Image: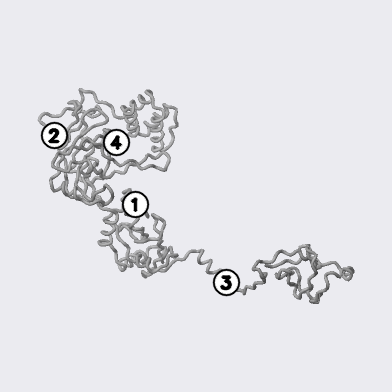
Amino acid sequence: MAAELVEAMNMVKSFRVSDLQTLLASMGRSKSGLKQDLVGRALRLVQTEYSPELLKNVRQLYESRFPKTPGWLAARRPEGVPVTYSSLSSSPNATSQGADYLNGISKPIHTPAAEVKLVPLPFYQTLETLLPPTELIAQSNEKLQDNQCIFELTPNQADQIRNASEIRPGIKTFQVVLRICYTDSIGVQEDQYPPNIAVKVNQSYCHVPGYYPSNKPGVEPRRPCRPINITPWLHLSTVTNRVTITWGNFGKRYSVAVYLVRVFTAADLFSQLKLCSVESAERCRERIQDKLRFDPESEIATTGLRVSLICPLVKMRLGVPCRVLTCAHLQCFDAVFFLQMNEKKPTWTCPVCDKPAPFELLTIDGLLSEILKETSEDIEEIEYLTDGSWRPIRDEKDRDRERERSSTPEYPVVDICIPEANGHSPAHSSTSLTGKSGSGSTGMAGLTGGAAVALGGGAVVDLTLDSSSEEEGGGAGGDSEDTEDSADSPAPKRGRYNYDKDLVTAY
């Protein structure tokens, strides 16, 4: 059941858009959308509603794309042309028919071709080749194939691995790694795993990197194809080591190789970068002047180029500014974070323009390194000028803040709050204009300027009095209990907002 499900999913992945639409329509699903949406929809259909009818439809569509050739039309291997593979042995269930046919189609005869070359990896230095790139050969019509390769270690190689130091717990600096790629002699090949891969070393399965989860809906998870460390399962002696590779046979050709390598860390590569690839400040200024040089054929004259001091990878201030020599932009990224991220997930892509950024083309910007030392932490952007000089670009908020600070006059601050003897602020007063307090205490004398000293020692200020009321009062205060004299007096004036002029205690 599980094998058939895996087989159906791999068939779906090889479908064209028309095949996917036919499959989805036959099962009552929507057939609109891009190919990646159709593939994701079909895979979910196979996983959730697996049935004999669905498997039959998938197989029919697959066979319509890869039709089986009749036996009488199949080309046979010419006599006298043996096919031998020195380091690969066939699986036990291999048949003579499987050696001649692949998925019902006659298998082409592969003459010895040029050597497959694998791309060099920055974190792995190849010391010796234990098994040169050798093609994996399908031995039957089955979708899952097994191939076995054998190799031996010399005593010096075994001692070198056994006595190697550890860069991390369980990870040694000297390793034996297995690399798999497409069988193509044109150019250099990147690591590429076949479907349904499993690796067994001396009867023990070793770890193969898993898939990266995808945050985008409808996008399949990606598997990081990197060298597979098989060192822990090897015989560190002259005993023969056997590696069995299980892989999915879906029409593509793969080759396998085994190397003895030395493993580097991000710190090791950073040391190499500082030692061998630093562009001087003078050369950087020349590059800037070349970009800002006046072009008479251009209608737009560029007077400056702005460069951010914030790393686009981690959104923090640059520590070691780095860029790619082949990129046209002057924007840099942090070398330490870039190497650390590629150590965990190797992509080697420029975070600014998304172009390839191999380690061999990385360089440290000497001019921007000097600028980072001369500028303060609050400067996040600079501008290069036509003569190669630069000036800091301040944030708009900082400029507005400085403008407000320069235009706002400064006034002396007067503290009108007088604390009590015990250090506490005075309580609220409910004293009215007549001077009677809520507790029935004696009235207060009127104060010149509308201020009076409260019982608790706080300053009482009449915030509604104006100059005219002060002149009418004459600055003299009367007895608050003399109600007969105030009976004939006019009603108290009301303020602008039509409320009585009460006295407010200021703290």
Question: What amino acid is at disc 1?
Answer: Met
Question: How many angstroms separate mark 1 from mark 4 (CA)?
Answer: 26 Å
Please name whichever residue, 91 or 189, is drawn nearer the observer in this view of the structure. Answer: 91
* The residue positioned farthest toward the front in the image shown: 422
Task: Tell me: residue 255, above or below residue 59.
Answer: below
2 and 3 marks in contact (CB < 8 Å): no
User: Could you tell which of marks 3 and 4 lies nearer the N-terminus?
Assistant: 4
Which residue sits at x=31%, y=51%? 343
Q: Label 3 belongs to which residue?
A: 407
Q: CA distance from mark 4 to mark 2?
A: 25 Å
**Amino acid marked by disc 4:** Pro
If you read the primary sequence from the N terminus, does the residue marked by circle 1 or circle 2 appear first? 2
Q: Which residue is mark 2?
A: 84
Q: Which residue is mark 1?
A: 341
Earlier in the chain: of badge 4 and badge 2, it is: 2
Q: Residue at x 83, y 67 (%)?
A: 492
- Residue 430's label in the rendered image is none
Which numbered disc, 1 or 4, marks the residue closer to the eye? 1
Furthest-left residue in view? Answer: 80
Looking at the rendered structure, the kind of residue marked 3 is: Ser
**Quadrant of the rendering where the N terminus is positioned:** top left
